[in-house]
Image: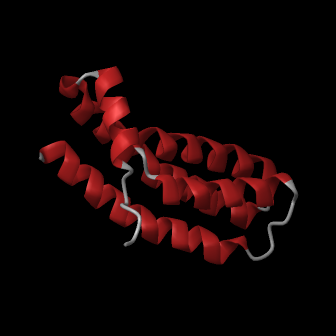
Amino acid sequence: MPEPIIDPPTFQALKDMSGADFMPELIDTFLDDAPQMIADLRHALSAGDAEAFRRTAHSFKSNCRTFGALGLAELARELEFAARENRMAGVGDKLERLATDYEGVAAALKGLRDG
């Protein structure tokens, strides 16, 4: 059985901590910020700015973990470490996978927000 896109215990812990009434706003903030972060990763990659890439990947990873998007967080962690070690060659494919996988996470979070 595949792992869920959003880890239910992690999401529930956030909901318990933040309050159910605040969750739609938290989700919307993530959904607003994430596409810009992905764009920032693409820009840093094309500019060869490993430090900006690392910082953005780190923030993206943290945001994903907060919501329980653990698979997406793991991809971001891999990108973060590649940048930390200045191994930027070949991260483009992984970045595009992150962008594609984000779409599934966004759909799952919208469902949780509206459900």
Position above or below: 65 against 77: above
- Quarter of the figure with residue 24: top left
- Quarter of the figure with residue 59: top right
Looking at the image, residue 45 sits to the left or right of residue 108; the answer is right
Residue furthest out toward the left: 115
Looking at the image, residue 8 sits to the left or right of residue 76; the answer is left
Q: Is residue 49 visible?
A: no
Q: Is residue 56 visible?
A: yes
Position above or below: 109 against 104: above
Residue at screen point 64% across, 50% down: 57
Residue at screen point 48% across, 50% down: 36
Way the structure is coloured: secondary structure
* Place of residue 1 in the rendered image (x, y in percent of width and height, measured from the top left): 37, 72
Residue furthest out toward the right: 85
Position above or below: 55 against 6: above
Residue at screen point 87% across, 59% down: 86
* Place of residue 15 in the rendered image (x, y in percent of width and height, measured from the top left): 29, 30
Compare residues 101 and 14 and report the one nearer the observer.
14
* Place of residue 79 in the rendered image (x, y in percent of width and height, measured from the top left): 69, 60
* Place of residue 66 in the rendered image (x, y in percent of width and height, measured from the top left): 46, 38
Looking at the image, residue 54 sits to the left or right of residue 94; the answer is right
Compare residues 19 and 93 and report the one nearer the observer.
19
Compare residues 80 and 92 and report the one nearer the observer.
80
